[in-house]
Image (cartoon, rainbow, N blue to C red):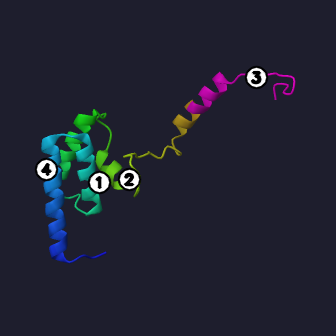
């Protein structure tokens, strides 16, 4: 979708202003709203986006390795949560470890209708 250049500039200015204000206030709800609005406006490359992400991670006390930018980018429309999942299906050592946990914690249960099957 190609919007007129004037509209794109106005959207970038509005997103930058919202991100700057939210960063200054430090309210997590307002920061999240500004980050999501910037994504919707296609203004994730404004200079205020990075500091807003850093401030959001700080006020929410998120771990260092969490990629809030990716969370915002992958957020589904109408979904309230910022969530991203890494694909671990090809991580064979992790699969082996999970299988080991299952194998070591399995208990056979025998009841009148189940004979440990």
Instruction: Please tell me in which quadrant of the rendered image residue 3 appears.
Output: bottom left
Q: In the shown orientation, is residue 115 left or right of residue 97? A: right
Residue span colored magenta: 98-117
Residue for badge 2: 75
> Does residue 9 sit above or below 57 in this rendering?
below
Residues at marks 1 and 2, CA–CA distance in whole angstroms: 8 Å
Whether pointer 2 and pointer 4 mark residues with C-beta atoms closer than 8 Å, the reply is no
Residues at marks 2 and 4, CA–CA distance in whole angstroms: 21 Å
Q: Earlier in the sequence, mark 1 or mark 2?
A: 1
| Residue depicted at 58% across the width and 33% down the height | 96
Q: Is mark 4 on a helix, strand or loop?
A: helix
Q: Which of marks 1 and 4 is nearer the N terminus?
A: 4
Mark 4 or 3: in front is: 4
Quadrant of the rendering where the C terminus is positioned: top right
Q: What element carries label 1?
A: helix
Residue for badge 3: 108
| Residue depicted at 41% across the width and 52% down the height | 79
Check disc 2: other Cα within 10 Å, few if <14, some if 14-19, many if 20+: some
- Can residue 46 be seen in this snapshot? no
> Does residue 1 sit above or below 32 in this rendering?
below
> Does residue 104 sit above or below 94 in this rendering?
above
Whether pointer 3 and pointer 1 mark residues with C-beta atoms closer than 8 Å, the reply is no
Q: In the shown orientation, is residue 38 left or right of residue 84? A: left
> Does residue 1 sit above or below 94 in this rendering?
below
Residue for badge 1: 36
């Amino acid at each position: 979708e190609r919007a007129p250049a004037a509209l794109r500039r106005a959207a970038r200015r509005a997103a930058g202003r919202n991100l700057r204000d939210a960063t200054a206030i430090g309210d997590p709800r307002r920061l999240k709203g500004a980050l999501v609005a910037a994504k919707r406006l296609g203004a994730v490359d404004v200079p205020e986006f990075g500091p807003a992400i850093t401030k959001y991670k700080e006020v929410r006390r998120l771990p260092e390795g969490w990629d809030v930018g990716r969370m915002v980018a992958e957020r589904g429309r109408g979904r309230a949560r910022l969530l991203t999942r890494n694909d671990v299906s090809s991580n064979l050592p992790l699969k082996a470890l999970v299988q080991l946990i299952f194998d070591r914690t399995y208990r056979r249960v025998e009841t009148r209708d189940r004979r440990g099957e």
